């Protein structure tokens, strides 16, 4: 899922710009660690500017990128120095964006005791009107309220973690449906259930068993992991095997063709690529010279938030 985080929406001053930049960067890192594809409006510190309203440019960038969700981080202001709390602004109140805003605001309210000012539909939020995806501005608090500003500036990692958790929870069902669709598409394009290439010019074989387990102890076998094995030589990659692991986490025995290059005496090179929608992907190169039977254990990290 592609999420555009506007961490330089329209900062009131240089200090606010720094807070939004750092908070958005942390949100991005958490989401990436969880498997999201994230783009920041200000990926580097030298790209932020105080007082500049570049929301339209950022919306256009998100549209061109094909983002599934647009979230702008903001610190609002008021003539009333006692005005306080976090809120969300939407132009087109879709179910998806309201779910994200609701989760984030509830997280901020319950964990930081910031007042929940709820979601407001604003017809004057013209930049959001241009968005081709669900979009919202998250007002994290008031820059004109000392308590709000002190809380947000002093707890950027906590605020970012609560925002990321809200996005993750609100998009859970959509991501699950998308992953299921990807699995069905993969299955439809993979007939039979496994593919094994037997080159005519092969001279010998090495039988390989790939086992896929969780990294976190106690290690458990991962079922239905997609495994592909490529033969690499002269800058080319030839697909040798493609299949899935069973309930024991093992593939079918894979026959790796050995060409036995006696001139260079280089070992044969194969790349094992493992993918599963609940785990981080992993590639591993193996080198085989005279082996006849080998087993490779691949461990995958679960896609989840790591506590700060």
Image (spheres, rainbow, N blue to C red):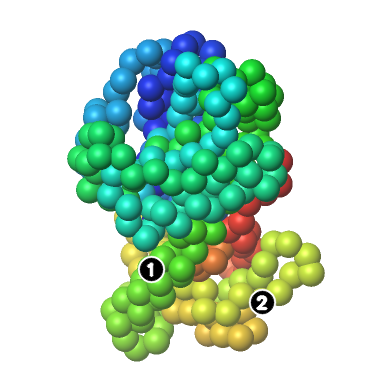
Q: In whole angstroms, how far apart are the C-alphas of marks 2 and 1?
A: 24 Å
- Callout 1: helix, strand or loop? helix
Direction from residue 16 to residue 59 in the image, left or right: left
Direction from residue 200 to residue 170 in the image, left or right: right
Instruction: Return the x and y of residue 81 as percentages of the image width and height.
Output: 56, 18
**Residue holding disc 2:** 221
Q: Residue at x 52, y 79 (%)?
A: 224
Instruction: Return the x and y of residue 168 as percentages of the image width and height.
Output: 52, 55
- Callout 2: helix, strand or loop? loop
Q: Residue 178: name its quadrant.
A: bottom left
Question: Foreground residue, 140 or 253?
Answer: 140
Q: Residue at x 34, y 45 (%)?
A: 121
Instruction: Return the x and y of residue 308 as percentages of the image width and height.
Output: 71, 41
Q: Residue at x 31, y 76 (%)?
A: 185
**Residue holding disc 1:** 178
Q: Residue 50: name its quadrant.
A: top left
Tell me, yes or no, if residue 308 can be seen here.
yes
Name which of mark 2 and mark 1 comes first in the sequence. Answer: 1
Q: Residue at x 46, y 25 (%)?
A: 76
């Amino acid at each position: 899922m592609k999420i555009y985080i506007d961490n330089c929406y329209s900062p009131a001053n240089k200090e606010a710009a720094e807070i939004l930049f750092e908070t958005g960067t942390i949100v991005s890192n958490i989401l990436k660690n969880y498997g999201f594809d994230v783009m920041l409006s200000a990926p580097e510190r030298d790209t932020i500017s105080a007082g500049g309203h570049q929301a339209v440019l950022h919306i256009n960038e998100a549209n061109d990128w094909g983002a599934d969700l647009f979230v702008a981080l903001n610190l609002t202001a008021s003539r009333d120095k006692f005005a306080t709390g976090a809120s969300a602004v939407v132009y087109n109140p879709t179910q998806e964006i309201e779910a994200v805003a609701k989760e984030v605001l509830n997280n901020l309210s319950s964990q930081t005791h910031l007042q929940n000012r709820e979601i407001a539909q604003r017809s004057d939020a013209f930049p959001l009107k241009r968005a081709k995806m669900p979009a919202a501005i998250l007002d994290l608090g008031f820059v004109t309220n000392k308590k709000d500003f002190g809380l947000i500036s002093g707890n950027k990692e906590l605020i970012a973690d609560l925002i990321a958790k809200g996005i993750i929870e609100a998009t859970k069902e959509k991501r699950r449906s998308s992953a299921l669709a990807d699995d069905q598409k993969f299955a439809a394009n993979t007939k039979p259930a496994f593919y094994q290439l037997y080159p005519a010019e092969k001279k010998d074989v090495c039988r390989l068993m790939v086992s896929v387990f969780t990294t976190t102890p106690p290690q458990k076998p991962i079922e239905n992991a997609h495994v592909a094995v490529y033969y690499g030589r002269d800058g080319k990659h030839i697909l040798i095997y493609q299949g899935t692991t069973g309930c024991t986490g093992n593939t079918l025995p894979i026959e790796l063709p050995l060409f036995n290059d006696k001139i260079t005496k280089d070992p044969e090179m194969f790349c094992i690529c493992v993918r599963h929608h609940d785990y981080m992907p992993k590639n591993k190169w193996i080198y085989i010279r005279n082996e006849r039977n080998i087993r490779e254990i691949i461990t995958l990290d679960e896609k989840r938030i790591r506590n700060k």
